[in-house]
Amino acid sequence: MTFKISRRSFICGISGASLIPTSLIAQNNDNFPTEIPESEETLEDLELKITPYKTDRDMPIGKIGNVEISRLIAGGNIISGIAHSRDLIYVSKLMRNYFTTQKIIETLKLYEANGINTAIMRVDDRTIDILTRYWRDYKGKIQWIAQAKPKRSNLYEDIDIAIDNNAVGAYIQGQVCDEFVKQKDTKLLGRLVEYIRKKGVISGIGAHSIEVIISCEKEKIYPDFYMKTFHPLTYWSAKHPEYYDNKWDFDPEKTKEVMKNIRIPWIAFKVLAGGALHPKKGFDYAFKHGADFICAGIFDFQVEEDAKIAIHTALKNKERDRTWYG
């Protein structure tokens, strides 16, 4: 049996627990610490606007290759247990304890019930075991785009494993692509893209650095999609002079400028800056400035509201400077 828990009731229920990290509840705080210009809708305005949406009916769908994909894609941290938490040392462990196998399956069902038809997840035994059980035993249909981390000693292992286990696509993880480009091995990314494509699934290139995409375009390497970090630097911890797991797009203005001329679908990720931005701001910023899809980590108690915000912000930015691709 699935129990529906609102964000507000969840936070009220744990408000007395001193061990709950603020990074988990930041996006649930109506008084998030950013100034709102008079022309910008408040959270109360937004709540009124998103209420009529039926997420299973209204979620916009795009297309990458021959795969239909919801504009909001679920991130894989519910399985990996990885949480960007600045210098808090216990958040990832908390996530791994919260997301039991049964909780993960319940959350996947919530994704589908709210119009999210695709998740991006790592290639490892736990991911494959849970997805296989979900598809087989619970008749789930969520699509898996695999995050591959090729090793120079074995470039294709992750890709082969993912495709053999029913992934609809695979992309090369951003840090790997950053490193290949830094070492002047961009053409190797082209080989990987073509290998994935020849396997009959959609292929992508990830990036934290915009130089990856610039280099791929220069080398005429055209994946089916790019996966690039994107978020504004308006939240408090982004302004800290030292880097400590606190930002993932160091130059969003340059990202905007480069991506506006790219004619390939763009999945933006880290759009909430590891929980520092409310979805109202992060989703809107990403869609407004060119993202065709957004990938976000979503707790079970956030699914319905985040889906409605994604619908609202995608429709709101239907007319924008960058053409929609996909």
Image (cartoon, rainbow, N blue to C red):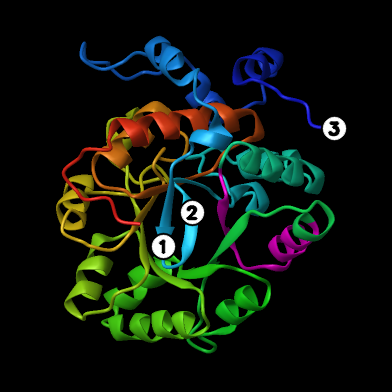
* Residue at (62% x, 39% y) in the render: 91
On the image, numbered disc 3 is attached to which residue? 1
Q: Residues within 10 Å of mark 2 (few under 14, many from 20)?
A: many
- Examine the structure image and report whether residue 132 is included in the region drawn in magenta: yes
- Mark found first going from the N terminus, 3 or 1: 3
Tell me the CA gap for discs 2 and 1: 7 Å
Whether residue 146 sits left or right of residue 42 in the image: it is right
Q: Residue at x 60, y 68 (%)?
A: 167
**Element marked by disc 2:** strand
* Coordinates of residue 66 in the picture (x, y in percent): 46, 67
Q: Image quadrant of residue 114?
A: top right
Left or right: where 258 falls relative to 137: left
Q: CA distance from mark 3 to mark 2?
A: 27 Å
**Residue 30 as seen in the image, left or right of residue 114:** left
Q: Is residue 276 visible?
A: no
Tag 1: Cα neighbours inside 10 Å, few (<14), some, or many (≥20)?
some
Mark 1 lies on a secondary structure that is strand
Q: Is residue 20 above or below residue 136?
A: above
The stretch drawn in magenta includes residue 267: no
Mark 1, residue position: 64
Q: Residue furthest bottom?
A: 153
Q: Position of residue 230 (x, y in %)?
A: 32, 47
Task: Please state which of the two labelled residues, at mark 3 or mark 2, is closer to the viewer.
Answer: 2
Q: Which mark is nearer the camera, 3 or 1?
A: 1
Label 2, on which residue? 69
Residue nearer the viewer, 208 or 244: 208
Q: Which residues are magenta?
A: 116-133
Q: What percent of the width, then of the height, locates residue 99?
A: 73, 42
